[in-house]
Structure formats: structure tokens, C-alpha cells
Amino acid sequence: MKFMESFIVSVGGSMINPSSVDVEYVKEFAEIIKKSDSPKIGIVVGGGQTARTYVNSMKSFTSNDFFLDEIGIMATRMNAKIVSSSIGRPEMNIPEDVNDAARQLMSCGRVVMGGTVPGHTTDTVSVLFAEAMGIKKVYNLTSVDMVYDEDPRKNKKAKPIEKMNYREAFSISLKSYTGAGSNQFMDSVALLIAMRSGIEINLMHGKDLDNFKNALKGEKFKGTKIAAD
Ligand code: UTP
């Protein structure tokens, strides 16, 4: 498969680990990565059900978001270890910060990581990773098919948007911010970083991996492109 451009892909925890690890999904995703000719691929993995279970259990003992985030990060790193194994790299040290990830990506072309520090989600990690590497494309494989102008679960008339600029995306993301555990299509910090560095974000449902392949090949795909006007 000819995917020549370097890219970062952020895989939602809800794809990798919806209730337990979806091994078949991980295998299918890994095949795409293994067959890709892209010089550099950074993979950032979310926490999914493991993060939710551990964060919720820990809430019985503390309401401190900083520490709740820390246990969420641990879950993302467990999922990252599964994904690094799936691409044939079980020995990979899962980078704990973006600098380390960037150094590893320079030298070996494929890196899998999870979260870094409290205060944001792996959406932000993926965009910071792209920024550090000078990579201009991020694919966000998530649990919604497109970004809507309003929450489609609350408003049946919400309109899907195929292309939007950073400011529009930021304002929609901020509207759904409710603090820790917010249900945003993407975290707002990630959108600010993308804006300052002109990083294009292609958001799509992660389950449809053929759609992801079309996006990688530069063909038409179902999803939302967030970029400069
Ligand atoms: P995720 O990136 O999976 O968060 O990280 P999410 O968006 O809530 O989950 P999905 O994509 O909808 O499944 C899981 C949790 O780990 C912490 C946050 O608490 C986050 O909610 N985290 C993650 C951090 O604090 N810092 C990071 O860099 C990454």
C-alpha cells in the first residue's frame, strides 16, 4: 500500500478497548500500519474501558482530577503496549513524553505511545507529537463518524460538517466541555495546537478501517477535515 506521507494517528480507547481489548480490531489496524510505506508513523492510543473503570473506581477514594488523570494515563500506556506488540514491537519502551517519542520516531520510524501528563487527553498528545516532528497530518480514529454543529444525541437536526476551520472546531469543542471526563469530539487544547502549527486533523469513526485506508490514500472518506480556510 502506498501511503507515502508521514502521519500521526490517534486511536480512541473506545476502538482498542471498548469493554475489553478488541483483539481482532487491533490486528486489522496493525496490518494497515505494517503495510504502510510512510516514512514515519506515530501512533497515540487512548485508555478506553480500562481508563474509565480505573478512574471511576479511584473516585471512591479521591476527587482530585490530577491523580485521576494519572491513573487514566496508566491505562492508555497499557493499551499502547498491546498496539506496539501488534505491530511486531513488544519490546518497545512506551514513551512517557513527546520528546522521547520524537527521538524514538526519528530513529526507528514507528512509535506507539499513550498519555503524557495530567490535564489533557491523548488528542492533545497526538497533535503535540505531530508538532514536535513537523508532521502536518493527524488522523483521529474515534467513536463518532463526523463532527456535528450540535450534539446529535440532543438535537436530531444537528448537521454533520465535512470541513471546518480551527476556530469553528474550537468553539464546538468548548461548548461540550464539562470538566474531567467531558464528551468532546476532540479536546480543545489539541485544536489550539493544531491551529498554531497548521496541522490538518482528519476525524472519522475508527471502526471503519477501509474508510481510514481511503483517507490515508488521499481518497474520499467519510469524516471531518479540520484545517485552515
Ligand atoms: P483518553 O485520551 O483515552 O481520554 O485518556 P478520553 O478522551 O477521555 O477517552 P476516549 O477517547 O473518549 O475513550 C484517558 C484519560 O487519561 C487521562 C485523562 O484523564 C483521560 O480522560 N490522560 C490521558 C491525561 O491526563 N493525560 C494524557 O496525556 C492522556
Image (cartoon, rainbow, N blue to C red):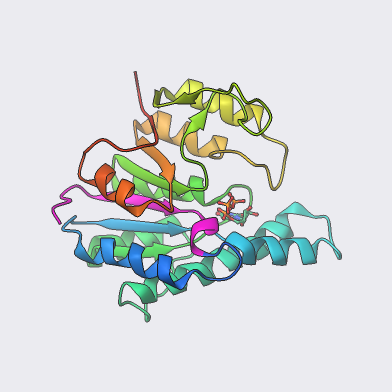
> Is 82 drawn above or below residue 213 in the view shown?
below
Residue 194 location, quadrant: top left
Q: Is residue 11 left or right of residue 89?
A: right
Residue 192 screen position, x and y as percent: 49, 32
Numbered-mark total: 0
Judge whether residue 116 can be spotted in this image. Answer: no
Residue 198 location, quadrant: top left
Quadrant where the image shows the N terminus? bottom left
Magenta region: 1-16
Image-quarter location of ligand 1: bottom right
Question: Residue lying farthest top?
Answer: 229
Q: Residue drawn 50% across and 54% down?
A: 12
Quadrant where the image shows the C terminus? top left
Judge whether residue 78 can be spotted in this image. Answer: yes
Q: Residue drawn 63% across and 48% down?
A: 119
Q: Residue drawn 32% across and 48% down?
A: 212
Residue 59 location, quadrant: bottom right
Q: Residue drawn 41% across and 22% down?
A: 165
Residue 40 screen position, x and y as percent: 23, 56
> Is 214 drawn above or below residue 47 in the view shown?
above
Residue 37 screen position, x and y as percent: 16, 58
Residue 13 lies within the magenta run: yes
Q: Is residue 71 left or right of residue 6?
A: right
Question: Residue lying farthest front?
Answer: 156
Question: Residue lying farthest bottom?
Answer: 91
Residue situated in front as seen by the camera: 141 or 198 = 141
Residue 88 screen position, x and y as percent: 30, 77
Residue 146 lies within the magenta run: no
Q: Is residue 168 left or right of residue 215?
A: right
